[in-house]
Structure formats: C-alpha cells, structure tokens
Image (spheres, grey):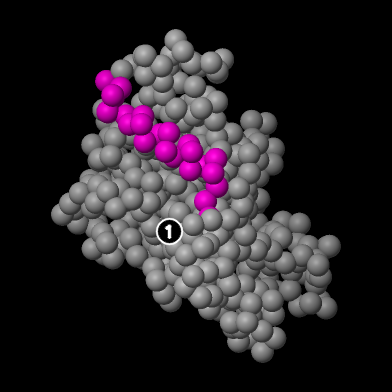
Amino acid sequence: MEEKKFGDLDVDLSALQENPQCPHGPTLLFRRRNKDGSVSTKDAYYACSAYRDTKECRFHLAFGAKREAVKMKQQQSGGSKKRKRDEMLEFHRPERWLDDAEVAYCARCSHILAEEEVSGHNHKEVQSVDPRFPTRFLLPLNENQSEAQYFFSKSTLDFFLGLVQSQKVKRIINIGCPRLHEEAISSSVIKAKSFLLDLDSRFAQFFPRKSFAQYNMFNNHFLTELGHADFKSFLGETAPEDVLIVMDPPFGGRVEVLGHNLRQLFVEIGGECRVAWIFPYFMEKHVIRELPSLVMDDYKVEYDNHRKFKQVATGAGRGSPVRIFTNIQPAASIPHPSKEGYWMCADCERYSSRENKHCLACGVCSSKDGKTWRHCQTCAKCVKPDWNHCKKCKRCHAKTCLAKAETTEDGASFKKRSWKFSGGKR
C-alpha cells in the first residue's frame, strides 16, 4: 500500500457525478491529508478535472460552499478563447467534406474552410489538406501543460495496428489516440470499427458523430448527451471480449482517477474488456494498484513530436520510457517488431526488448528502464547495472542515493507531481 504523507492531496471519488460541474463536466474534490494520516475537509475544494490553466477553466470552489456560490462559479468558469473555438467548430461539421480528398484548412483558425469562405479569408495560413488524417497537419496543443498533445510515431502506429489485427476485436475505443483512430477508420485491412473519445473539439470537424465524441477521461464525462448516445450506439450489443480500449492519457494525470473512470467504462461496456493503457514504466505499481489485471509490456511507445520519447537513431541511450499496460492474454499473442530488437522469451512466454535479458535466478526478464539489469545475490533480485550493494542500507542503490529524490519501487527518480497536473499532457 502506498504511504500517504502529510500535506498530500487526496481525490475523493465517492460521489464524482454529484460534484459541482464546470464546462468540462463534474469537478474533482481534493482533500489534504493531516499529520495523523486522516483526510481533512478544512481546506477541501473542487477544481476542474481537465485543466489547470485558468485561461481554459477558472472553476475553483471551496468544499461546502452555498448553492449560490456554486452557480456563480459555474457561470464564470470556462475560458472565453476555448468557448469561441468550440462554438465556431459547430458550424463546420465533417459531413460536408467526408468524400473530399482535399479541403482548405486555416491553421490559425483551426478549422476547415468551405469553398465560399476561402476567397474572403484574411489569414495566410490556409493550406490544402487531406481531412482523413488531421493529426498530419493539426498543430499539437502543446503551448501549455493542460492540453499538450503528442502523436504516435510511424513505428508505434504500425505496432498498434498489428495489435488490433492480431486480437481480432470488433470495436476499438481510442481514448486520446487520434492518430490510431484516423488510421483505423481509413485502413482497408482493419475490420474493427473505431471510436475516438477526446477532449480536443477540433476533431469534430474531421470525424462524423458515429466515430467521435468529445470526452473528458478525468471524470468519464461526455460533453454532450448526443455524444454519449452516439457512443452507446457504437457499442451496440458488442460483447466485452470483442472490445479493445487504447488509452493514452496525460502522464501527470492522477492514476486513481483514470483507473476509476476505466472501471466505469467497463460497466457501460458490460464487463472488463481488453485494455492497452499507455504510461511511463516508473508508474507501474500505481497502475497495477488500480487495475491488478494489467501487466506491463516491454514495448517502448514513441511519439513524432516529442524529443525524448523517440527512437534513438544511434542506438545509444535507453529509448522511450513509455510502456503499455495490458490485460491481453496470452502475452505472446501481442506481435512485436523483431527488426527493433524485440525477441520471444520462451521461459517468460512473452516478448522482451533487446537489452532485457532473462534472469535464471529471478525467473523473469527483469529490466524495465532500457538498461540490462544484473542479479544481486544478497538482495536476491535484479537491480540496475550502476547500482551497488550497500552494507549500511542492506540493499542496492545508486552511489548518489538516499536522501533527496523520491523514488519508485524500481528506483527511478522523479519529482513528486501535484494534482495540478491532472489535465496536463506529459
């Protein structure tokens, strides 16, 4: 069980759907932990689950506030820039150009221009684009930490398309995975139907209602009732075992919130379906705590527009720290690209990365961070190659060990994140 410390913020999910709402659905209730480990209501407050940037949503309300204050906050919340963009996109539904190979698109306005609009448009950022593949030309929302986007690389996209084919699912639910969605619905090879759940309203002008709904993964909220109805229609009578959820959330998101909302989706689907949850390897114990049926796969997820989460062309370095947590069984049924160094471990009955060697003493391929780990006889487990056994601590650790860095179970250092990253992308 994870140790809770004084001052930590807990998220109360006991009555999420009953919490006051901002434009992005039910807010989250945060409570601060006391020195004795109990949770205080003194400084508790509600805040937007999706955004920490007040330009996007200004909702912040003390717990126990009067009903009048709640109504006032609801009227005041929501960034004017984002509201204007959403209202504008409602007039540019995709049905008008679904069969067009090229359309005019303004990068500054972030919307497609009808033929009659092009000649009178004042911006210079107008270009001809293929509306079937919006992630190839949309500017990623990475100007702030509340809605920054990263799109799968070609190799990672091929991996997921291969995964979909191998599992022979009938429905794919892409949560925050627009590039996989656009490829799936455009592919003649993929037989499964795909549905995109994403908070980015720009996709509404490229994908028809039957395959897209604006959705907040941090409170399991559909921004329109019509979008929720379209999602239910997409699921139909499909059995849970025929559904695959691929979820690529912001890496600073609260894991307990994401896990809670996935379980709520399972209820709507009719049971636990197959899941591919994309998250950093050092968050393994947190993910498994929320969904014990998930296991971390060795595949390294890469993004085109992120300098750290890319293939290392020189072969140096450890590659991307992003992994897939999945309940797909058997693990050997997930195809991995041998040209990238992945190999089938007969003992583990799963694929391992190039540097991950099988340890006979531990009985597993033990590496997790892109290095080749070694076995410590005293600790009776594998550790990182640059760790040494410390007689004083009676365990292995790095030379600079001990004090100031917060570490995960496997020793990866990272700064503690606050609730404010709940809507941030990486």
Percent coordinates x, y for residue 38 in the rendering:
60, 87
Q: In this view, does 231 lie above or below 73?
A: above
Q: Is residue 385 above or below residue 154?
A: below
> Does residue 273 appear in the picture of this structure?
yes
Which residue is located at x 43 percent, y 76 percent?
Answer: 14
Q: Is residue 214 left or right of residue 403?
A: left
Q: What stretch is highlighted in magenta?
A: 77-99
Q: What element carries label 1?
A: strand
Which residue is located at x 42 percent, y 45 percent?
Answer: 198
Amino acid type at mark 1 = Gly
- Residue 277 quadrant: bottom left
> Does residue 176 appear in the picture of this structure?
no
Percent coordinates x, y for residue 140 in the rendering:
55, 35
Work out which quarter of the rendered image holds the N terminus and state it.
bottom right
- Residue 285 quadrant: bottom right
Q: Is residue 201 left or right of residue 2?
A: left
Q: Decide which of 69, 63 is in the foreground and name it.
A: 69
Magenta span has 188?
A: no
Residue under circle 1? 25
Q: Decide which of 426, 67 is in the foreground and name it.
A: 67
Percent coordinates x, y for residue 95 in the rendering:
27, 28
Percent coordinates x, y for residue 189 in the rendering:
27, 30
Which residue is located at x 38 percent, y 24 percent?
Answer: 131
Which residue is located at x 55 percent, y 40 percent?
Answer: 81
Crowd around label 1: few <14 · some 14–19 · many ≥20 (10 Å): many
Q: Decide which of 299, 8 is in the foreground and name it.
A: 8
Which residue, as the protein is rendered here, is positioned at the far bottom?
36
Q: Is residue 398 left or right of residue 22?
A: right
